[in-house]
Image: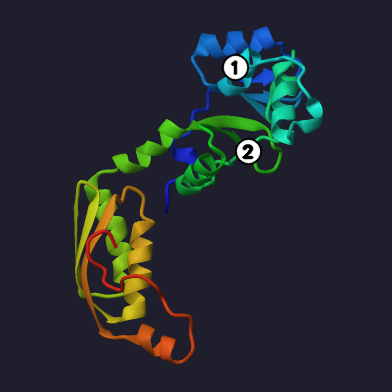
């Protein structure tokens, strides 16, 4: 099973209520050395996030300017810069995950939204249960090579009994053969999904090229290299 947020999350969370003052938010972040804090309501449901970037908007040029020609993004920044409470400063709605969210999904959310922390909430109540940071996700690459190999062997065995698996420094080396080329593509894709895999070096051969047959029958053509050498 892929690693989930439950495996790496921190259950100690520094959160603030919506009514917390600007000074209270700063104090909480400085005291606990965190770069962002969730904002919660009276039921501890997450309603937003305040990051150090939000707080630093106070240092932006606060001259009135011509608000008619300002875009939505700049207007939001001005509102945050003039905010006095967590509710006025926070980014909302908050992007959250549950304990069952995979680490790959959490990493994708952080990358796409350019954030470094995600509140972890109960899927039913929305109440906060923890926090996962970008640095926590690196733990997926700290798995022992034998554990990675066991997971890769389980994947490979569904496609072929003629493949050897070796793992060194997170790099999976595959040697052997499968019956069909389409199986090769599917197998490599699944191996990439195993937690801790850094790269895949494949020397797998195939007996029947059913991919070219599908193309000739009118299926969309696969672009790019078809070999599965290093990095494929």
Residue placed under numbered mark 1 in the picture: 56
Q: SS at mark 2?
A: loop
Q: Nearer the viewer, residue 52 or 101?
A: 52
Q: Distance between the residues labelled 1 and 2?
A: 20 Å
In the rendered view, tell whether residue 71 sits above or below residue 78. below
Residue 207: name its quadrant.
bottom left
Crowding around mark 2 (Cα neighbors within 10 Å: few <14, some 14 to 19, many 20+) is some
109 vs 102, nearest the viewer: 109
Marks 1 & 2, CB-CB < 8 Å contact: no
- Is 17 left, or right, of 3 in this rendering? right
The residue that label 2 is drawn on is 95
Q: In which quarter of the image is residue 212?
A: bottom left
Q: Position of residue 123 (x, y in %)?
A: 65, 43
* Rendered-image quadrant of the C terminus: bottom left
Q: Which residue shows up at 27% across the image and 54% down it?
A: 199
Q: Earlier in the sequence, mark 1 or mark 2?
A: 1
Q: How is the image coloured?
A: rainbow
Q: In the picture shown, does residue 217 fall above or below 73?
A: below
For the point 43% across and 80% down, the residue is: 221
């Amino acid at each position: 099973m892929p690693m989930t947020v439950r495996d790496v999350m921190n259950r100690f969370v520094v959160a603030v209520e919506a009514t917390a003052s600007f000074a209270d938010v700063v104090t909480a972040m400085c005291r606990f050395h965190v770069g962002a804090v969730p904002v919660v309501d009276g039921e501890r449901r997450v309603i937003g996030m305040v990051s150090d970037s939000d707080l630093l908007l106070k240092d932006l040029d606060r001259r009135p300017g011509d608000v008619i020609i300002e875009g939505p993004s700049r207007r939001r920044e001005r509102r945050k810069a003039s905010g006095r409470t967590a509710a006025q400063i926070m980014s909302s709605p908050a992007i959250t995950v549950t304990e069952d969210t995979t680490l790959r999904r959490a990493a994708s959310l952080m990358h796409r939204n350019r954030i470094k922390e995600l509140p972890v909430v109960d899927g039913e109540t929305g109440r906060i249960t923890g926090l996962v940071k970008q640095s926590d996700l690196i733990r997926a690459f700290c798995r022992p090579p034998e554990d990675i190999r066991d997971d890769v062997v389980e994947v490979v065995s569904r496609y072929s009994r003629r493949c050897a698996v070796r793992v060194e420094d997170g790099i999976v080396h595959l040697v052997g053969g499968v019956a069909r080329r389409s199986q090769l593509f599917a197998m490599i894709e699944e191996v990439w999904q195993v937690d801790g895999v850094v790269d895949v070096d494949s020397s797998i051969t195939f007996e029947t090229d059913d991919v070219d047959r599908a193309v000739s029958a009118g299926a969309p053509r696969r672009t790019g290299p078809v070999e599965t050498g290093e990095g494929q």
